[in-house]
Structures are given as structure tokens and as C-alpha cells.
Amino acid sequence: MIELLASRYTYVLMFVLLGIGLYMVIASQNLVKKLIGVSLFQTSIFLFFVSMAYVEGGSAPIVPPESDPGELLVASPLPQVIVLTAIVVGIALTAVGLALVIRIYSEYGTLREDTLREVRADE
């Protein structure tokens, strides 16, 4: 079992990051900590996609003209492209989230979720 975990350490790291990110989103009352948790959660998903796309002994999907394409072991570029797009979208969402957090703090003077609920209930 230890040998299996050692050979698949990226999956173990992915589950650790996923758990930490999910815990931060659920347990934290601070909005900035929730955003950090969402970012960790996204990073774990990126790591999962890249780990799944890894091909042992594979090469770049560039086929030389003198070789037979059926005999080559190549890695698919699609997961890397999807992860790259997801990273850009994740950065944009984090930036929008941080802008909203700044606006909430300037309006209410706090970033705690429970305090914000109390203030909104009084209005």
C-alpha cells in the first residue's frame, strides 16, 4: 500500500489540497480565507487533470514524417489546454472575488460572514 501511494504521490497531494480547500470554504467565517480555500480547491482539480494526462514513456504529440503514427506513445495535449484555460478563468474569478471583498469591507467594515448576516438583517 505504501509503495502504491509513493508511486501516485500526485493523487495524494491532490486529495490533501482538495480537503484543505474544502475545509477552508466550509469552516472559515472570513471571506478572504474562503477565497483562498476556493483557490486551493481549484489547484487540486488542476493537479488532478494534469496527473490523469501523464503517459509513462510518452512524448510530445509531434509525429516525425519517417515514423509510423500507430507505433508512437504520445501524450494528449487536450488536458493541458483545458487546465491552462481553467487557470485563466480561475485567476479572473479570484480577481472578481477580491474586488467584491474589498467593496464589502468598505461598505460594512468587516469580512466575517456571521457579522455581515447580522448587519444585513438589521437593514
Image: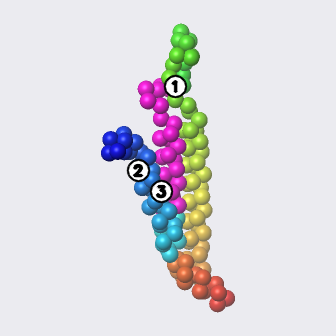
Question: Residue farthest to the front?
Answer: 1
Q: Which of the 4 image quadrants contains residue 62?
A: top right
Label 2 element class: helix
Q: Position of residue 33 (x, y in %)?
A: 48, 68
Instruction: Give the side of residue 3 with respect to residue 49, left or right.
Output: left
Q: Amino acid at mark 3?
A: Leu
Find disc 1 in the rendering and name its residue.
74
> What residue lies at 56% left-to-right and 33% top-to-bottom?
77
* Residue annotated with mark 3: 18
Mark 2 belongs to which amino acid?
Leu
Which percent across, then down, holds residue 52?
50, 39
Q: Residue at x 56, y 60 (%)?
A: 94
Spatial separation of the CA atoms under disc 2 and disc 1: 25 Å
Q: Main secondary structure of the magenta part?
A: helix
Rendered image: mark on residue 13: 2
Q: Position of residue 15 (x, y in %)?
A: 45, 53
- Classify 10 Å Cα crowding around label 2: few (below 14), some (14-19), many (20 and above): some
